[in-house]
């Protein structure tokens, strides 16, 4: 079908139709001009012949005289015959020219016949006059009964017939010309209508094959330019325009994918920014609360230890039952335990509130992960669960080892708590583009889109054990962000496991500080010292 032709084929067809239209119009015009030229040539020649034939007739009509001298009539008539022959020869020459130029249909046979007849009659008249001049007759030459007079009359009649023949041919040619003119007009009308129809068809095909596809392409491009990347340009012209539309659809698909990717990245960065703002606000509050609580906690811990040491001496001098002594010791121990429990909570709040840089050094992440795995293998929730970690070699990065260890510990413990028996946690790593990427993929309960949206929010938890505070992943997110890294969570849905990806730069960031510059909280140092003493006594 023509609709599957390439553009060059359609152009060739269009040019062929244009040439055909021009050929039809030119043919009709040339036919009319040729008919007009032929008619004009015939009329011109016949008019010239008519003038010469009239001249022949006029010369013949001069034969009878007037001749006053009766005796000189024969000589005078005989002298007129060469003039008639000269006029007749001129006519014959013109007739031959007309025949040679093919301006007559029958090659002038009738006219030539009249010329021969007139020429023969002139010869007969010439001999008759010669005889009458040599032997003068008794009858006058111009008498109606004279053979010479009869011959003159016949010549005049034949000249009139010749003129009539020429006039008839001229009238016939004029009639034929009128007929040919009407036929030329009909031909021109027919060719004109045909040309108009062909041009209309050409314009219609041009609109369907070229203009309409280009307009559809333009509309599609305009829609894409307005941001409608899902619009597909449907063109079935079977030519380069269809190929262009397909290529443009492919480009639009790539742009749509790129746009969606960029939009997703922008949304993710927006969520991270909102999350960071929330974390900053909560961190500011947590810092204030932790600071205010640390001071009374230090006093409680200090006083409880002092009271315990003094009571041990006082109780020796006071008469008291063993049960009372045990009760007093139990309450003091409970005060100390709860104080240190509050201390652990404030330590988490302080760790959460710290947004500044901590001391960093070149650390092997493989050793950090291995240390975390050694810690959790003795936990109750790690039984009947498998952890697969196969390092290919050391992974050295510039980080704060304790903070990164806290991140990995949170991820591993969360995975163990959310997996059933016979569950598996796979830890893999790879290095690319100056970053180390670690993947923690478990076979646990998975996460819904709502959980994924708020997984790093402070105090947000969906722990199955019900013991989580909702700060672990928030603190982990802040730690990774402070190391110029990224952490993201993905899940295919509930019951399909979860995946956490942690990305850290290999080289240290410009704002990393030296370990010697790290400032310790004095209250926290006191609580740490108290914890050490308590552990020593317990030992």
Image (spheres, rainbow, N blue to C red):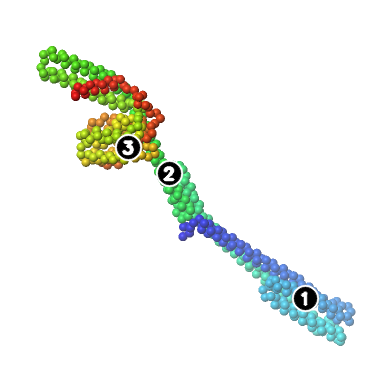
Name, please, the residue furthest toward the top. Answer: 317
- The Cα atoms of the two marked residues, 1 and 3, are separated by 129 Å
Name, please, the residue furthest toward the front. Answer: 393
Residue 89 is marked as 1
Residue 260 position within the rendered picture, expressed as x and y whole percent measured from the top left: 39, 41
Residue name at image x 29 percent, y 31 percent: 406
Q: Residues within 10 Å of mark 3 (few under 14, many from 20)?
A: few
In depth, the one of 537 and 48 nearer the eye is 537
Image quadrant where residue 28 sits: bottom right
Dot 1 lies on which element? helix
> In this rendering, which labeled residue sits more in front, label 3 or label 2?
3
**Which mark is first along the chain, 2 or 3?**
2
Residue 39 position within the rendered picture, expressed as x and y whole percent measured from the top left: 68, 68
In depth, the one of 458 and 379 nearer the eye is 379
In depth, the one of 40 and 320 nearer the eye is 320
Would residue 161 appear left or right of 213 to someone viewing this image? right
């Amino acid at each position: 079908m023509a609709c599957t032709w390439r553009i060059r084929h359609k152009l060739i067809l269009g040019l062929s139709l244009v040439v055909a239209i021009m050929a039809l119009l030119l043919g009709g015009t040339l036919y009319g001009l040729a008919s007009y030229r032929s008619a004009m040539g015939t009329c011109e020649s016949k008019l010239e012949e008519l003038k010469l034939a009239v001249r022949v007739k006029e010369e013949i009509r001069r034969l009878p005289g007037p001749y006053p001298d009766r005796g000189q009539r024969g000589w005078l008539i005989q002298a007129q015959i060469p003039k008639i022959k000269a006029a007749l020869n001129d006519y014959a020459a013109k007739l031959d020219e007309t025949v040679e130029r093919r301006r007559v249909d029958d090659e002038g046979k009738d006219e030539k016949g009249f010329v021969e007849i007139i020429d023969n009659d002139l010869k007969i008249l010439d001999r008759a006059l010669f005889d009458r001049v040599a032997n003068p007759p008794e009858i006058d030459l111009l008498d109606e009964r004279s053979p010479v007079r009869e011959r003159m009359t016949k010549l005049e009649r034949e000249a009139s017939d010749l003129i009539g023949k020429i006039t008839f041919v001229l009238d016939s040619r004029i009639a034929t010309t009128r007929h040919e003119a009407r036929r030329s007009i009909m031909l021109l009308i027919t060719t004109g209508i045909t040309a108009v129809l062909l041009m209309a068809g050409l314009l219609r095909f041009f609109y369907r094959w070229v203009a309409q596809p280009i307009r559809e392409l333009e509309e599609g491009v305009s829609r894409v330019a307005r941001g409608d990347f899902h619009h597909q340009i449907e063109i079935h012209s079977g030519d380069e325009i269809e190929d262009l539309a397909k290529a443009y659809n492919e480009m639009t698909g790539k742009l749509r994918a790129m746009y969606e990717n960029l939009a997703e990245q922008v949304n993710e960065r927006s969520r991270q920014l909102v999350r960071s703002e929330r974390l900053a606000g909560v961190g500011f509050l947590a810092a204030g609360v932790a600071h205010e609580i640390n001071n009374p906690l230090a006093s409680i811990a200090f006083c409880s230890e002092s009271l315990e040491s003094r009571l041990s001496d006082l109780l020796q001098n006071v008469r008291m039952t063993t049960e009372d002594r045990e009760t007093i010791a139990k309450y003091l121990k409970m005060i100390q335990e709860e104080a240190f429990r509050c201390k652990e909570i404030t330590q988490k709040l302080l760790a959460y509130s710290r947004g500044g840089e901590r001391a960093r050094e070149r650390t092997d992440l493989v050793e950090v992960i291995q240390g975390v795995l050694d810690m959790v293998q003795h936990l109750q929730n790690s039984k009947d669960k498998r952890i697969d970690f196969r390092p290919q070699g050391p992974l050295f990065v510039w980080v704060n080892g304790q903070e990164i260890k806290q991140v990995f510990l949170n991820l591993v413990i969360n995975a163990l708590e959310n997996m059933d028996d016979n569950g598996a946690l796979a830890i893999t790593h790879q290095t690319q583009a100056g970053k180390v990427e670690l993947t923690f993929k478990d076979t646990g309960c998975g996460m819904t889109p709502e959980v994924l949206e708020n997984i790093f929010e402070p105090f947000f938890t969906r722990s199955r054990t019900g013991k989580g505070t909702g700060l672990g992943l928030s603190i982990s997110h802040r730690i990774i962000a402070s190391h110029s890294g990224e952490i993201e969570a993905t899940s295919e849905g509930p019951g399909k496991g979860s995946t956490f990806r942690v990305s850290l730069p290999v080289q240290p960031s410009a704002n990393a500080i030296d370990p010697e510059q790290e400032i310790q909280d004095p209250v926290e140092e006191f609580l740490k010292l108290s914890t050490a003493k308590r552990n020593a006594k317990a030992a």
